[in-house]
Amino acid sequence: MEWSFSEHESGSRIVVRMAGDCDLYNAPRFKAAVLGKMESGVRRLVFEMSELRYLDSTGVGAIIGILQAAKRLGGELSFVGLGGGPRRVLAMTSILPLMRMGAPGPGEAVTARGTR
Amino acid sequence: MKTLIVRKLIVDDRNELFDAQGMRHIEFPSIFSKIRDYTLAVLADCPPAFREGNLLEQQLSEIIKNGVKHGNRCDSAKRLRVWYDLRKRARFIVEDEGEGFSELEAWNDFYRRRQTALFEEDFDAFLDLASYRGPRSDAEDGGNSLVAALEYWNGGMIYDASRRKVGVVRWFSGGSD
């Protein structure tokens, strides 16, 4: 039940790497951190999800909250590397059509030191 | 021509999903930090084919969370009871000691509006409706666990008359003995 997220700049974008289990214990803090970034002016975010193993309804709720903030603030989000169980959960909740899937750009799939 | 079909949560006290004969039984105190541990304990002997990666674990964990958090309000003196049968399909009955899911009709109304917006491809409206917010929801509630549950539990998801007990079934292609 490991979880980490980290961020780094890639050109004009911030890449947020999600790894492990984004669940009822971790997702609220993750959501707050990303919303804090967006509220402080960050508008272009890429979510790198290839190491995301587990996503529950709280994690889906975090993604919904981030999508709602992007709509409110005029942000531009893209998601890369989504697969497995997390993709199925997002499909079952019909959230996938709201998520812009993108190919990973240079530096977007790098491993960065996590923030627990 | 596309047709909108909206599932809904159902109350049926006499449904066969509440027949616990032959099912295994386990109980837990309602401790929020233990929800995923409880889920893993129930699934300890689960056939690998039923796990579908970690999808079964995730969906069962949502039901246990609903009982611990929304039913028993994380009161550790209140018990969460789980009956389970992992022969041929994944079947569970989960009962808490709370007041019952009084928002069931409101949730069904929310879900209809949500799915209508999706059907009409009104994505702005859909995004606003993506998460359920009831009078007792808090900022940490995802508000979508029942949306996925209606999709996942393909053999049914039924509440009893008290609305403290829910029965669910998922069938798998190929089955298992």
Image (cartoon, coloured by chain):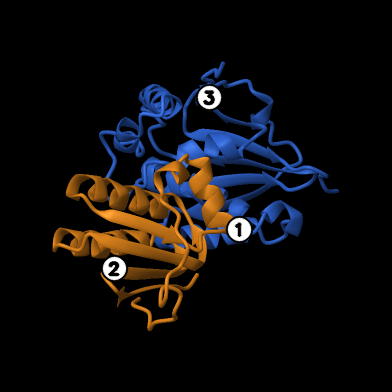
Chain colours: A orange, B blue
- Please indicate, yes or no, whether residue B74 appears anywhere in the rendered image: no
Specify few, some or many for label 3: CA neighbours under 10 Å numbering under 14, 14-19, or 20 or more.
few
Image quarter where the N terminus of chain B lies is top right
Amino acid at dot 2: Arg
**Nearer to the camera, B169 or B85:** B169
Give the CA separation, mark 2 to mark 1.
Answer: 31 Å
Residue B67 screen position, x and y as percent = 45, 44
Task: Return the residue found at the far right.
Answer: B177
Residue at 47 percent of width and 36 percent of height: B147
Would residue A30 be visible to someone looking at this image? Answer: yes
Q: Are marks 1 and 3 on the same chain?
A: yes
Nearer to me, A42 or B132: A42
Above/below status of A11 relative to B132:
below
Q: Where is mark 2, residue-wise?
A: A13
- Residue sitting nearer the eye, B32 or A85: A85
Q: Position of residue A41 (x, y in %)?
A: 15, 62
Q: Name the disc covering residue B7, or none.
A: 3
Chain of the residue under the numbered disc 2 shown in the image: A
Dot 1 surroundings within 10 Å: few (below 14), some, or many (20 or more)? some
Residue A1 image point, x, y percent = 50, 70
In space, the residues marked 1 and 3 are separated at their CA atoms by 24 Å
Determine the secondary structure under disc 2. strand
Q: Marks 3 and 2, Cα distance to the nearest angstrom?
A: 40 Å
**Parent chain of label 3:** B
Dot 3 and dot 2 residues touching (CB under 8 Å)? no
Name the kind of residue labelled 3 in the image: Arg
Label 1 sits on residue:
B54
